[in-house]
Image (tube, rainbow, N blue to C red):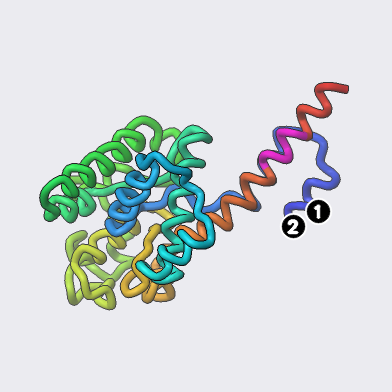
């Protein structure tokens, strides 16, 4: 039964929202690939510029010429998600120790901006991740939390020590970059359902392999498609409630 059919015969407002949540809400939270943090720095700089942040055809063509159409679309949609999450009261985005380590390699003002972004998101996840995402385990986003990894999970992964998941000859060996293995492995250990990336040469390329570990790989453009449907349904339901209250 799809969402529309389920809602058709349901009058309880609480249950109606539950149906929308179950059917349409994208997988949350999402652990950010470090490239997305770099992209968010670009988004922030566009927002800071004293101009309209919408993109006319000419500006979009320039952006495509600079980054290619796929990345240009992801950047624009990432910016839209960023502002929508701010307006709607929170970011379903997580950062981990590997993000901090990788941005630590940057230099100059770029490094300072990246540190501000990851610190900002880390502050938000400290505020409300435990209440919002009960299925995830925030302490496993940090290396010191590896001692809490379940022995049953290690057995299921075919390893005996948590660190083996990150090694070049471990279960994630198809990811050639150590940082990518650490981010993917961290998401698996912490039971984070999705990684958000704009890098088609790593996570996106191996999304089918990662799905075997229960990890979904998303790009901003497809994530926005999911949220557009979800937000549209929620907004429509809220409008429905307001119309009934006015009767």
Secondary structure beneath dot 1 equals helix
Please name whichever residue, 46 or 93, is drawn nearer the observer in this view of the structure.
Answer: 46
Instruction: Give residue 71's quadrant in the image.
Output: bottom left
Residue 90 image offset from top left, x and y in percent: 45, 36
Name the side, left or right, on which 221 lies relative to 158. right
What is the residue that sits farthest to the right in this orientation?
247
Residue 56 image offset from top left, x and y in percent: 53, 56
Residue 246 image offset from top left, x and y in percent: 83, 22
Residue 69 image offset from top left, x and y in percent: 45, 70
Residue occupying image coordinates x 36% and y 42%: 49
Please name whichever residue, 96 or 135, is drawn nearer the observer in this view of the structure.
Answer: 96
The residue under label 1 is 5
Residue occupying image coordinates x 37% and y 61%: 197
Residue occupying image coordinates x 32% and y 60%: 153
- Graded by Cα atoms within 10 Å as few (under 14), some (14 to 19) or many (20 or more), the crowding at tag 1 reads few
Whole-number angstrom distance, CA of label 2 to CA of label 1: 5 Å
The residue under label 2 is 2
| Residue 218 visible within the image | no
The rendered magenta stretch, by its main secondary structure, is classed as helix
Instruction: Give residue 15's quadrant in the image.
Output: top right
Looking at the image, residue 128 lies above or below residue 62: above
- Graded by Cα atoms within 10 Å as few (under 14), some (14 to 19) or many (20 or more), the crowding at tag 2 reads few
| Residue 153 visible within the image | yes
Please report contact status of discs 2 and 1: CB closer than 8 Å, yes or no: yes
Name the side, left or right, on which 132 lies relative to 186. right
Region rendered in magenta: 234-239
Looking at the image, residue 69 lies above or below residue 233: below
Name the side, left or right, on which 69 lies relative to 184. right
Looking at the image, residue 16 lies above or below residue 195: above
Residue occupying image coordinates x 68% and y 39%: 235
Instruction: Give residue 118's quadrant in the image.
Output: top left
């Amino acid at each position: 039964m799809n969402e529309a059919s389920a809602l058709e015969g349901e009058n309880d407002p609480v249950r109606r929202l539950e149906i929308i949540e179950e059917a349409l809400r994208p997988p949350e939270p999402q652990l950010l690939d470090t490239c997305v943090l770099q992209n968010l720095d670009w988004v922030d700089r566009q927002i800071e510029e004293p101009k309209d942040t919408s993109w006319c055809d000419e500006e979009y063509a320039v952006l495509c010429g600079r980054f290619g159409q796929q990345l240009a679309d992801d950047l624009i949609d990432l910016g839209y998600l960023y502002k929508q999450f701010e307006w709607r009261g929170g970011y379903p985005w997580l950062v981990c120790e590997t993000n901090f380590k990788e941005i630590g390699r940057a230099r100059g003002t770029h490094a300072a901006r990246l540190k501000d972004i990851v610190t900002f998101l880390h502050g938000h996840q400290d505020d409300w991740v435990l209440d919002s995402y009960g299925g995830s385990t925030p302490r496993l986003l940090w290396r010191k939390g590896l001692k809490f990894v379940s022995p049953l999970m290690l057995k299921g992964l075919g390893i005996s020590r948590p660190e083996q998941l990150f090694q070049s000859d471990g279960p994630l060996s198809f990811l050639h970059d150590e940082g990518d293995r650490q981010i993917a492995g961290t998401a698996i250990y912490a039971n984070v359902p999705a990684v958000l990336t704009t890098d088609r040469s790593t996570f996106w390329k191996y999304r089918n392999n990662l799905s075997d570990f229960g990890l979904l790989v998303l790009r901003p453009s497809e994530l926005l498609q999911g949220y557009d449907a979800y937000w549209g349904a929620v907004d429509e339901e809220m409008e429905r409630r307001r119309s009934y209250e006015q009767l």
